[in-house]
Image (cartoon, rainbow, N blue to C red):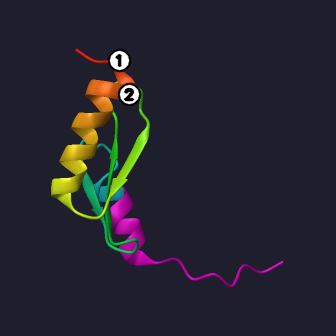
């Protein structure tokens, strides 16, 4: 069987660029910010970076660590 799928060089570039990156990153194709929680590694998504900060703070303070 011949694989007719052509690899996307831009996607390969992004995967290599952000392989060891920690923090919120912009997904060009989904048009949203993504972030993995530092404690529980749960993926978080938001449309803007400002909302991502609010989601991250709410998640770590209330859901992940169980409050202060």
Q: Secondary structure at mark 1?
A: loop
Residue matched to label 2: 63
Of all residues shown, which one is farthest toward the left?
Answer: 50
**Where 4 sits versus 53, above or below?**
below
Magenta region = 1-15
Judge whether residue 48 can be spotted in this image.
yes
Give the image quarter of residue 20: top left
Percent x, y for residue 61? 26, 26
**Separation (CA) of disc 2 from disc 1:** 5 Å
Give the image quarter of residue 28: bottom left
Percent x, y for residue 14? 33, 64
Percent x, y for residue 64? 37, 25
Q: Residue at x 41, y 67 (%)?
A: 12
Number of residues whose C-alpha sits closer than 10 Å to that of mark 1, classed few (under 14), some (14–19) or many (20 or more): few
**Where 41 sits versus 33, above or below?**
above
Of all residues shown, which one is farthest toward the top?
Answer: 68
Q: Looking at the picture, tell me which residue is in the foreground, 57 or 10.
A: 57
Q: Residue at x 34, y 35 (%)?
A: 37
Q: Looking at the picture, tell me which residue is in the foreground, 60 or 42.
A: 60
- Label drawn at residue 56: none
Q: Quadrant of the N terminus?
A: bottom right
Q: Secondary structure at mark 2?
A: helix
Pointers 2 and 1 in contact (C-beta within 8 Å): yes
Residue 41 in magenta stretch: no
Number of residues whose C-alpha sits closer than 10 Å to that of mark 2, classed few (under 14), some (14–19) or many (20 or more): few
Residue matched to label 1: 66
Give the image quarter of residue 59: top left
**Where 40 sits versus 5, above or below?**
above
């Amino acid at each position: 069987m011949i694989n007719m799928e052509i690899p996307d060089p831009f996607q390969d570039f992004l995967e290599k660029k952000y392989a060891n990156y920690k923090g919120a990153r912009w997904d060009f194709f989904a048009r949203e910010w993504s972030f993995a929680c530092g404690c529980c590694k749960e993926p978080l998504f938001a449309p803007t970076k400002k909302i991502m900060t609010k989601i991250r703070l709410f998640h770590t303070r209330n859901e992940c660590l169980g409050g202060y």
